Image (cartoon, grey):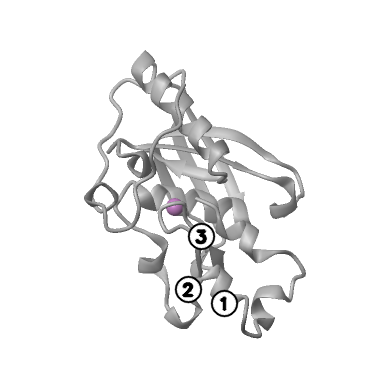
C-alpha cells in the first residue's frame, strides 16, 4: 500500500472523462483501491476519486461519518466502480463542500438531495443504493470527478467560495447556523 499524490485543480487529469474499468476483479484495480483508501485516510478526507490520484478510471471510494447522515448511521467504507447516478425527485439543496484537490477551500454547492446509485464492487457484482442528504452529496461530488467536474463548476453563488481560514474571519451566519463545524465537511472529497 502507498499514499498517493493528490492532483490539484488545474491538472489535466482532473478535467477529462475517466475510462470505465473493464475488470473490477483485476488485482491491479484492487491495489489501486487499497492505495486510494490509504490516501483518503491520510489526507484526511471522506471521499476520493481515482482521477484525483492521477488515474483516469471510473473508481470512487468514500465513507460518511454518522454525524453527517440523516439517520446518524455511518455509511461504511464503500467502493464504487463504474458508478451511475439517477436523481430522484426535483428537490435541490445547497451545502458547503470542500475537495482534496482544492485544499483549504470551501464553497456552497446546490445538488439534488435524493438519488439512487448503482456501481460494481470489488467482486464485479453490481449493487444499488438509495441516498439522501449528505450521503447523496458525497456520491455526486465524487462521481463528478469521473466526468472532469469540480465543485466550483456547480456553484451558483461564487461569493461563498474561498479559503476556509479567511472566510472564518467574517460573520458567517449561514455557515454556523446548524451548529456544527462546517470546515470539517469542507476537507472532504
Ligand atoms: Ni473532490
Using residue 116 as the reference point, say whether residue 49 is left or right of it.
Answer: left
Q: Say which label, 3 or 1, has the lower sequence index.
A: 3
Secondary structure, mark 3, is loop
Residue 84 can be seen in this image:
yes
Read off the residue under disc 3: 98
* SS class, disc 2: strand
Q: Position of residue 38 (x, y in %)?
A: 52, 31
Question: Is residue 61 shown left or right of residue 182?
Answer: left
Q: Residue at x 54, y 56 (%)?
A: 137
Q: Is mark 3 within 8 Å of ligand 1?
A: yes
Mark 1 or 2, nearer chain start: 2
Q: Nearer the viewer, mark 2 or mark 3?
A: 2
> Seen in the image, is 169 located left or right of residue 146?
right
User: Residue 44's spot in the image, x, y percent?
Assistant: 57, 44
* 73 or 152: nearer the viewer: 152
**Which of 148/187 is in front?**
187
Do the residues under discs 1 and 2 have CB atoms within 8 angstroms?
yes
Q: Which residue is mark 2?
A: 162
N-terminal of the pair, mark 2 or mark 3, is: 3
Residue drawn where x is 71% and y is 74% of the image: 176
Residue farthest to the bottom, as pictured: 171
Q: Which mark is residue 167?
A: 1
SS type, badge 1? helix
Asked if residue 132 shows in the view, the reply is: no
Point 43% across, 79% down: residue: 158
Q: Residue at x 62, y 75 (%)?
A: 168
Check disc 3: other Cα within 10 Å, few if <14, some if 14-19, many if 20+. Answer: many
Find residue 36 and report its horizontal and vertical position in percent: 45, 32
Q: CA distance from mark 3 to mark 1?
A: 13 Å
The reply to whether callout 3 and callout 1 are in contact (CB within 8 Å) is no
Location of residue 26 in the rendering, given as x and y in whole percent from the top left corner: 35, 15
Amino acid at each position: 500500500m502507498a499514499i498517493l499524490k493528490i492532483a490539484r485543480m488545474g491538472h489535466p487529469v482532473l478535467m477529462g472523462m475517466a475510462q470505465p474499468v473493464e475488470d473490477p476483479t483485476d488485482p491491479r484495480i484492487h491495489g489501486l483501491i487499497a492505495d486510494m483508501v490509504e490516501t483518503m485516510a491520510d489526507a484526511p478526507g471522506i471521499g476520493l476519486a481515482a482521477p484525483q490520484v492521477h488515474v483516469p478510471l471510473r473508481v470512487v471510494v468514500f465513507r460518511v461519518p454518522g454525524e453527517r447522515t440523516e439517520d446518524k448511521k455511518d455509511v461504511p467504507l464503500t467502493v464504487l466502480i463504474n458508478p451511475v447516478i439517477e436523481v430522484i425527485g426535483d428537490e435541490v439543496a445547497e451545502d458547503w463542500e470542500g475537495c482534496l484537490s482544492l485544499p483549504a477551500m470551501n464553497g456552497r454547492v446546490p445538488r439534488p438531495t435524493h438519488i439512487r446509485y448503482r456501481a460494481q464492487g470489488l467482486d464485479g457484482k453490481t449493487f444499488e443504493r438509495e441516498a439522501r442528504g449528505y450521503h447523496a452529496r458525497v456520491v455526486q461530488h465524487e462521481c463528478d470527478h469521473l466526468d472532469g467536474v469540480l465543485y466550483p463548476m456547480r456553484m451558483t453563488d461564487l461569493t461563498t467560495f474561498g479559503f476556509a481560514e479567511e472566510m472564518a474571519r467574517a460573520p458567517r451566519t449561514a455557515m454556523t447556523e446548524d451548529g456544527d463545524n462546517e470546515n470539517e465537511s469542507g476537507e472532504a472529497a
